[in-house]
């Protein structure tokens, strides 16, 4: 088996961010139990749920709940943060098919106003 055939190399293969976002959006749209305005609002609320999971993981990684102790790792926090990013990008894609351009423009504006040149 060559290095390229190994599972570790396959797992590390680059994934196109926006292709994945479009595919996840299409998958969710195809099996959406609630549609219309209510479905849109629920898609946006999913982001709050994911942020709550970040908080839960941080509390668990630091052992701040004396009843539970340490229940998570910092790798769990990383994973939950990734879920927040994915959920936000899919929510943006739900609002506009031009999500890539909207995000790139916003990132450019934030970078321009935040970083000294």
Image: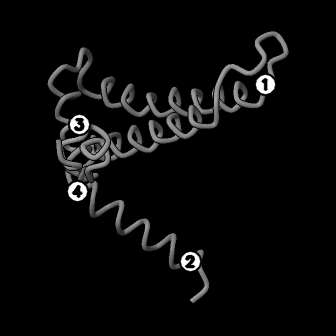
Mark 2: secondary structure: helix
Residue of label 3:
25
Above or below: residue 69 compared with residue 110: above
Above or below: residue 105 compared with residue 21: below
Question: How far is disc 1 from disc 4 in space, using C-alphas?
Answer: 42 Å
Disc 1 and disc 4 in contact, CB within 8 angstroms: no
* Residue drawn at the location 23% of the way across and 36% of the way down: 25
* Residue drawn at the location 33% of the way across and 23% of the way down: 38
Question: How far is disc 3 from disc 4 in space, using C-alphas?
Answer: 13 Å
Residue of label 2:
113
Image quarter of residue 44: top left
Image quadrant where one finds the C terminus: bottom right
Residue of label 1:
63
Image quadrant where one finds the N terminus: top left
Whichever of callouts 4 and 2 sits on the residue coming sooner in the sequence is 4
Above or below: residue 109 compared with residue 39: below
Disc 3 and disc 4 in contact, CB within 8 angstroms: no
Residue 10 vs residue 37, the one in the foreground: 10
Which numbered disc covers residue 98? Answer: 4
Mark 4: secondary structure: loop
Residue 40 vs residue 24, the one in the foreground: 24
């Amino acid at each position: 088996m060559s290095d390229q055939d190994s599972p570790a190399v396959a797992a590390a293969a680059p994934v196109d961010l926006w292709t994945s976002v479009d595919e996840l959006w299409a998958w969710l749209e195809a099996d959406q139990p609630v549609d219309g305005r209510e479905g849109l609002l629920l898609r946006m609320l999913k982001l709050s749920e994911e942020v709550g999971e970040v908080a839960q993981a941080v509390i668990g990684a630091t052992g701040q709940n004396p009843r539970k102790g340490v229940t998570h790792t910092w790798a769990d926090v990383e994973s939950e943060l990734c879920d927040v990013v994915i959920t936000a990008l899919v929510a943006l894609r739900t609002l506009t098919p031009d999500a890539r351009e909207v995000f790139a423009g916003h990132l450019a504006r934030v970078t321009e106003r935040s970083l000294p040149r």
